[in-house]
Image: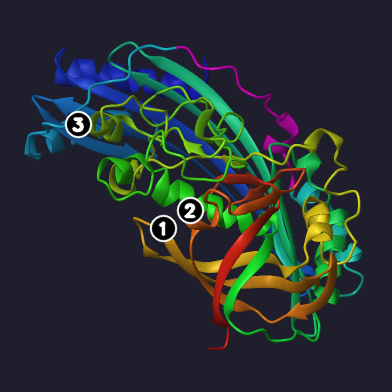
Amino acid sequence: MSVELDIAGRVIELVRRLAGAGAEAEVLAGHSAEALTRFANSAIHQNVADATTTVRLRLHLDGRTAAGSTTVTGADGLESLVERTIAASRLSPPDSAWTGLTPPDALRPAAGFDEATAAATPQDRAERVRDFVRAAGGLETAGFCRTSYTSGGFANTAGHAVQGRAAEAAMDGIARLDGADGVARRASGRLADLDGAALGVRAAAKARAGGRPIELPPGRYEVILEPTAVADILGNLATFGFNGKAFAQHQSFAELGAQQFDDAITIVDEPLGATLPFDLEGTPRDALVLVRDGTTSAVSHDRTSAAEAGAASTGHASEGSRSWGPIAANPCLAPGPDAADSDSADSEPGDGPTEASARALVARMRRGLLITDFWYTRVLDQKSLVITGLTRNGVWLVEDGEVTAAVGNMRFTQSYPQALGPGAVLGLGAEAVAMPDRWSGVRYTAPALHLRSWNLTGNASG
């Protein structure tokens, strides 16, 4: 039994003793350890680490629900948590939407856990930063390398008890030359998978190719989006489209069973290995097919949104899911059909501005744009998921299968589902690569994406 599961079990026993047999309670004790090595001006300037064990209790007593948390895991701290939550429940309004507790259920088999990543040292991360900086060949560099480890134990008064752990590593860096930035980023469950030198070469190649950009007029352009840009599409689709709360409240574009995307689009949430194998409510996580061959087949649910939609929880409860809705933990866009025959994405990291996942797509493009990244994306209309944002870290004009010029950054206004709609996808890269979220442990896995049309509404300066 893990330390966290032991803590969760002790809290359940306190609830039974202090609140009585009629109380329903669920407890998640989670330990999170994150370490971050940051660099700027081509040198490490910060190394920080934080480790916290947090115990979260949700209690349903006499028809009322309250929740509380603590980081004090000794006997007095746990007893205080239970007493405070009982007192809060008595002051709470009646909860007619209470969905009950997750019944006992076995966890799904998860990917292997990497001990080396969980135990990574500042030296381990510094070596990858060093390799990135050296490989950039004298260009100014900045970014981070991070490792994280999570372990958790869950128990409830219905007799359900589970435990698990997960590790993650990520690197995100830029190289800069005369105002042009090149980016390279990767995420993995194994720190050993992150090749700082290959990422540094790639970022530098993009920066060198980004000099003397031309300006193009606004309009609809055929585009190839590299995985770094596709990650933003997946993030917004998961947050606002495949969100069970938004779906239940008719604020999502999703229509189950409808052909809303091109036949080439299959999107699967694959949380196992990317996060704990169960959610905040103890529901086991498993792969969830959101879109199969263009047809929307599911949205992500916690127990609250599932009850509202007349569905079952998909294991996506989180601390904020009752407010913001349940969101996929590792949405993956399936690559093109030639993935088994493709070279590694790191096989030619210095091949101009184009990554391997996009190389074959560029060769087939008659005229259009190669876009590296999106940033500052904001929702203009949630129902149709119209997004506005800017390109970043490199845009290039492609003519007759060749990159011919760097292009200045541009603003776009585009419905993401429409851009991926039936007949709109011209191709997918042969290899999907994992990208880290900028703010959390969420991961996005995607190939490059060749789209018929993208609405660019102006240059970044106006």
Callout 2 secondary element: helix
Is label 3 in a helix, a strand or a loop? helix
Task: Tell me which colouring the rendered structure shows.
Answer: rainbow
Residue 117 is situated, as x and y percent measured from the top left of the image, at 72, 37
Looking at this view, is 171 or 445 the one in front? 445
Amino acid residing under circle 2 = Pro
Closer to us: mark 3 or mark 2?
2
- Mark 1 and mark 3 in contact (Cβ < 8 Å)? no
Across and down, in percent, residue 371 comes to 69, 66
**Front position in the image: 456 or 165:** 456
* Residue 119 makes an appearance in the image: no
Circle 1 sits on which residue?
385
User: 102 left or right of 196?
Assistant: left
CA separation, marks 1 and 2? 7 Å
**Circle nearer the viewer, 3 or 1:** 1
Q: Earlier in the sequence, mark 1 or mark 2?
A: 1
Three-letter residue code for mark 3 = Glu
Residue with the mark numbered 3: 83
Q: Is residue 110 magenta?
A: yes
* Badge 3: residue crowd in 10 Å (few <14, some 14–19, many ≥20): some
Alpha carbon of mark 3 to alpha carbon of mark 1: how far?
44 Å
Count of labels shown? 3
Q: Which residue is mark 2?
A: 417
Q: Residue at x 37, y 19 (%)?
A: 155
Q: Residue at x 31, y 26 (%)?
A: 311
